[in-house]
Image: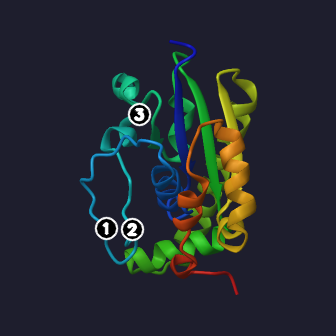
Amino acid sequence: MQNATIYIVSGLPRSGTSMMMKILTDGGLEALVDNLRKPDDDNPKGYFEYKPAMKLHKDNSWLGLAVGKAVKIMVNFTEFLPDDYHYKIILIRRDLDEILASQQIMLKEEDKRVDDIVRKIFTRDVEKAKRIAKERENIEMLEVWYPDVVRNPGHEIERIYSFLELDLDKDKMLEAVDPKLYRNKKK
């Protein structure tokens, strides 16, 4: 099974993982999703989630279903990926202030003390995932910054296409980028 590849879109909540999943699926990559969480005002194009991925730390028996497909796995769960597969992870990055602002709007709350705690946790989770990817031979990782995809989609889609080494439709991938959804920008 070591040669079986799973394509993972990872990142922090509100970092652009749903946009990246849409880019990949529009380009022709099948996704492992359950569509339990419906599109809403926060993610009008959909969430592209698979609920078992949120319990990867307890149960990874479903991963075989993801072989050859894209699946969204939050960055704090990537450390629980077993050695049984090869992983190509697209790590979506976004400024932490933008992520926290987006989360506050989505959750309709504002608490600066929570922001400081969450900022430390999020920073730790991203650094840990990057370190693990460097240490493990079965993980390849490409960092992609959300604002770069929105501002220069042609260049970023080319990077993603080259990294995945799949025959995807680059034009459809480009069409999936919607700059109107980049709403919580850092001033």
Image location of residue 109, percent across then percent down = 42, 80
| The C terminus lies in quadrant | bottom right
Task: Measure the alpha-carbon separation of dots 2 and 3.
Answer: 25 Å
Q: Quadrant of residue 33?
A: top left
Tell me the residue that label 2 is attached to.
Answer: 45
Asked whether residue 127 is in view, the answer is no
Q: Is residue 162 left or right of residue 87?
A: right
Find the distance from the CA under tag 2 to the CA under tag 1: 6 Å
User: Which residue is at a point 54% across and 46% down the rendered structure image?
Assistant: 9
Residue that label 3 marks: 56
Kindly identify the amino acid type of the residue bearing the numbered disc 2.
Answer: Lys
Label drawn at residue 127: none
Q: Earlier in the sequence, mark 2 or mark 3?
A: 2
The vertical placement of 130 against 85, above or below, is below
- Amino acid bearing label 3: Leu
- Mark 1 highlights which residue? 39
Mark 1 residue type: Pro
Q: Position of residue 75 (x, y in %)?
A: 56, 46
Q: Residue at x 63, y 48 (%)?
A: 91
Please rate how many residues cluster around mark 3, counting C-alpha atoms within 10 Å: few if below 14, some from 14 to 19, many from 20: many
Q: Give yes or no for contact between labels 2 and 1 (Cβ–Cβ under 8 Å).
A: yes
